[in-house]
Amino acid sequence: MKKILILPGDGIGPEIVAEAVKVLDRLKADGLSVELEQGLVGGSAYDAKGHPLPEDTLAQAREADAILLGAVGGPQYESLDRPLRPEQGLLGLRGELKLFSNLRPAILYPQLAEASTLKTEVVSGLDIMIVRELTGGIYFGQPRGVRTLDNGEKEGFNTLVYRESEIERIGRSAFEIAQKRGKRLCSVDKANVLEVTELWRQVMLRLASDYPDVELSHMYVDNAAMQLVRAPKQFDVMVTTNLFGDILSDAAAMLTGSIGMLPSASLDADGKGMYEPIHGSAPDIAGQGVANPLATILSVAMMLRYSFGQSEPAERIEAAVGKVLDQGLRTPDIAAEGQASVGSAEMGDAVVAVL
Amino acid sequence: MKKILILPGDGIGPEIVAEAVKVLDRLKADGLSVELEQGLVGGSAYDAKGHPLPEDTLAQAREADAILLGAVGGPQYESLDRPLRPEQGLLGLRGELKLFSNLRPAILYPQLAEASTLKTEVVSGLDIMIVRELTGGIYFGQPRGVRTLDNGEKEGFNTLVYRESEIERIGRSAFEIAQKRGKRLCSVDKANVLEVTELWRQVMLRLASDYPDVELSHMYVDNAAMQLVRAPKQFDVMVTTNLFGDILSDAAAMLTGSIGMLPSASLDADGKGMYEPIHGSAPDIAGQGVANPLATILSVAMMLRYSFGQSEPAERIEAAVGKVLDQGLRTPDIAAEGQASVGSAEMGDAVVAVL
Ligand SMILES: CC(C)[C@H](C(=O)O)[C@@H](O)C(=O)O
Ligand SMILES: CC(C)[C@H](C(=O)O)[C@@H](O)C(=O)O
């Protein structure tokens, strides 16, 4: 019996997570052996308990085999002190649970090809997996802060730091994923300027001999940003640092034009993971019941595959999502101009019905 | 009499710079009061003098009122020690001459709208100016390097650092440029994670009161990468750190589909500047006489405008470039499939003929 911690979070989080829970309940009825527990994170945790990652939640998260997160953040929390802001709940979970491997697929659904701002021939069939290091680099590096200089002015500083073992760990994650896909791995760095990413490149090169079936290439981050716009289908798997991964995975996701469809996984060394849609808490449409639950539902599929080793039900969910798109169901974010749209619950119910 | 230092550099550098020099010669004949001097930088300087930025070149650069650079780099230099690599010539010039304000326009030429991988309606009329901080941040921050830890493994580290005066300086540059354009400035940071960019945001907010006619907004870098793909025309001027500017300006340039057309300027506090095309040294086509010289020619226009305060001849050059495009002249990089193309010299001569 696997334990799943459900963290709805803020904004549209509760609405989309509710639909994903329907899917989990449906699979339970079919024999999937999981139990669900609810917890608080982000702004809603701050509201209830005064902290974006309360002790209780952290304890629940440590106990769980996997976590399903909605989204965190909202304008009402932006003036809080940094340690109390919703994002810190997310960063705290990543760091405390050592979820170092962040998988961010950018997949274009053929049914939604029109949604992309890119020409159809440039993106049709797009299927990239970005592997982002998630518990190191400049996000967690010390020293960091703001100091006052002798002349009275302030100076801000952050540290980008990686040690070989950290690079090796994320590198192996990425090589293994590449082995199961198109067997091409592009490591993205800025080795011509940053010493730490020169070390990154050396470690990737060294690892390559353990994965002779994977073709490794290297690209500078500025060029990678360009190539994602110019010819994104050249990529299979990309591996990069925490900050570069943050930027490039968002750009890659937007190439599909439908970020309401994209899930993500954040894994530790033992396959325990946190799963969440890549889109945010969308405060502007929160509470209206119109948010797209499919990215969250597809996050459940990733959970089954990566944390529970169950690829059969994962594929069932993915196929069901394809089916509801084939049926023409669209939440407003993925509806073409003039096309009728459905709400979150209708979409979730449709997936359950296909299942 | 203004002094211009010409640094052809490596790869296609000499070929494209030669065409820009033709344009300068033409303007001299019309009364533009400049004298040209040649110098060495990058790999070709390493070949001739053993260093990518020889003392002589630096002295010439200090003496000059403006610098026109082709491009640096090539595969034959990639195994050199870091301080000897061609890029160090470029970084050395930026740092030594305190060229802190890097202007990178991303403009879509209507004649070349087809070249973009984005749908025409998304990019037609695109005209963004990215203002990138160029002499600070993680590019120059100390401490940096690779150390060996007690357990024997290596750790790489770099420092992202900005002080208020540096942020204020680039901020004022950007506000002033926004005043002369669409009066909208978007400052890009990662203030939700990086303390130094929280300081960045505070300084931008403080500056805003000195430029009441400019509308300031803020965006996280990951979202900015997304928005450039989703709806790039929402931007007028963007201002950001050295590294974020490196990444975002390349992505923005590629939105146009014709990076062979895009110039750049790197300015110091007194308007002295280095001007260069944003594309690289393109070793694969070097020596063939087919490289597009228009970005370098347009860099001359930027030089006239920003370093010499001469907007009339700058506009003449820009209009001439538009004219040759109207005439249907295309180097291979901007030719549509099946369209006939011309070489670098033919393109340069055509611009001179229009002038
Ligand atoms: C909310 C923020 C701290 C976070 C990040 O930068 O990692 C988000 O952008 C993401 O990519 O998950
Ligand atoms: C060549 C490299 C050091 C340089 C940079 O990163 O600044 C280049 O990418 C640029 O943008 O001019």
Image: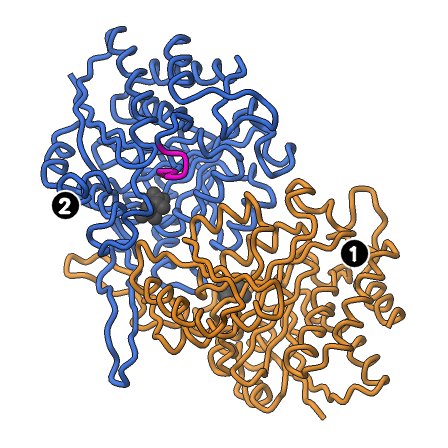
Chain colours: A blue, B orange
| Circle 2/circle 1 CB separation < 8 Å | no
Marker disc for residue B133: none
Please state which of residues B81 and A184 is positioned toward the viewer in this rendering.
A184
Rendering coords of residue A193 (x, y %): 43, 65
In the image, is residue B164 above or below residue B196?
below
- Whether discs 2 and 1 lie on one chain: the answer is no
Amino acid type, callout 2: Gly
Task: Kindly tell me whether mark 1's CB lies below 8 Å from ligand 2.
Answer: no
Amino acid type, callout 1: Thr
Question: Viewer-nearest of labels 2 and 1?
Answer: 2
Image mark count: 2
Q: Which picture quadrant has residue A231?
A: top right
Residue plotted at (18% across, 27% down):
A38
Residue A163 shows in this picture? yes
Please state which of residues A3 and B240 is positioned toward the viewer in this rendering.
B240
Residue A147 lies left or right of residue A106; in this view the side is left
In the image, is residue B54 above or below residue B74?
below
Marker disc for residue A50: 2
Task: Kindly tell me whether mark 2's CB lies below 8 Å from ligand 1.
Answer: no
In the image, is residue A81 above or below residue A76?
below
Residue plotted at (58% across, 82% down):
B271
In the image, is residue B16 above or below residue B250?
below
Rendering coords of residue A189 (x, y %): 42, 54
Q: Chain of mark 2?
A: A
Q: Which residues are magenta?
A: A280-286
Task: Write down the residue under mark 1.
Answer: B331
Residue B329 lies left or right of residue B132; in this view the side is right
Q: Quadrant of the N terminus of chain A?
A: top left
Please state which of residues B79 and B257 is positioned toward the viewer in this rendering.
B257
